[in-house]
Each structure stands twice: as structure tokens, then as C-alpha cells.
Image (spheres, rainbow, N blue to C red):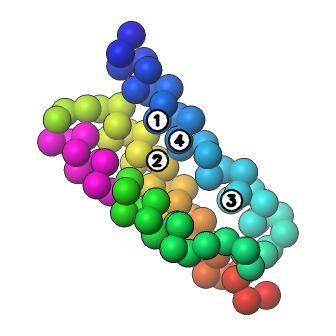
Amino acid sequence: MVEFIGYLAGFIAMISFVPQVIKTIRTKSARDISMNTLFLTLTTNILYIVYGIALGLTPVVVMLGIMTLIVLLQIGLTLKYRHR
């Protein structure tokens, strides 16, 4: 049950950026996206992944690994569409 809660929390955190990614792709605009927030989130994710690896917390590593990819995608989209 505890591992399920870990996966559920990770899943919710992971999908939290999906609506923004979809909006950025649809509008081809990232004018109001904060790069500071994205980089802080990326840093937090990396630290939590290291923490999860150190403690053998598979849900943390898997879900934050996926979330990190989503955040990296948003960073790429933001850089691409920021000044349009």
C-alpha cells in the first residue's frame, strides 16, 4: 500500500506539467512561462532521483524520472517559442 501511495503521488506530480506542455504546443507560445520555475523544478527532481536511488525508492526514481523528461520537454518548448 505504501508503494502504491508513492506511485500515485509521483503520477500526480508527473502529470502536473502535462497541461502546460500541451498548451505550449497548441499555442506555440511560452511567453508567460517562468524559466526560473522550470529550472528549480528540474533541480528538485534530480535531487529527489538521487535520494530515491540512494534509498532504493523505486516509485520516486521512476515517477520523477518521467517528470524530469516532461520538464525538459517544457524547457525546450519554452526556449523554442518564448520570443514568438
**Amino acid type assigned to the residue bearing label 3 in the image:** Val
Residue farthest along the right direction in this orientation: 27
Residue, disc 1:
10
Q: Nearer the viewer, mark 3 or mark 4?
A: 4
Quadrant that contains the N terminus: top left
Circles 1 and 2: CB atoms closer than 8 Å:
yes
Helix, strand or loop at disc 4? helix
**In the rendered structure, which disc, 3 or 1, sits on the residue that comes first in sequence?**
1
Q: What secondary structure prevails in the magenta region?
A: helix
* The disc label shown at residue 21, or none: 3
Residue farthest along the top direction in this orientation: 1
**In the rendered structure, which disc, 2 or 4, sits on the residue that comes first in sequence?**
4
* The disc label shown at residue 13, or none: 4
Residue at (78%, 60%) from the top-left corner? 23
Indicate whether residue 15 is drawn in magenta. Answer: no
**Amino acid type assigned to the residue bearing label 4 in the image:** Ala
Give the percent coordinates (x, y) of residue 42: 43, 62
Measured in 3D between alpha carbons, the distance from the residue under mark 4 to the one under mark 1, in whole angstroms, is: 5 Å
Magenta-tinted stretch: 46-54
Give the percent coordinates (x, y) of residue 70: 54, 56
Residue at (23%, 50%) from the top-left corner? 50
For the image, the number of numbered tags is 4
Residue, disc 2:
66
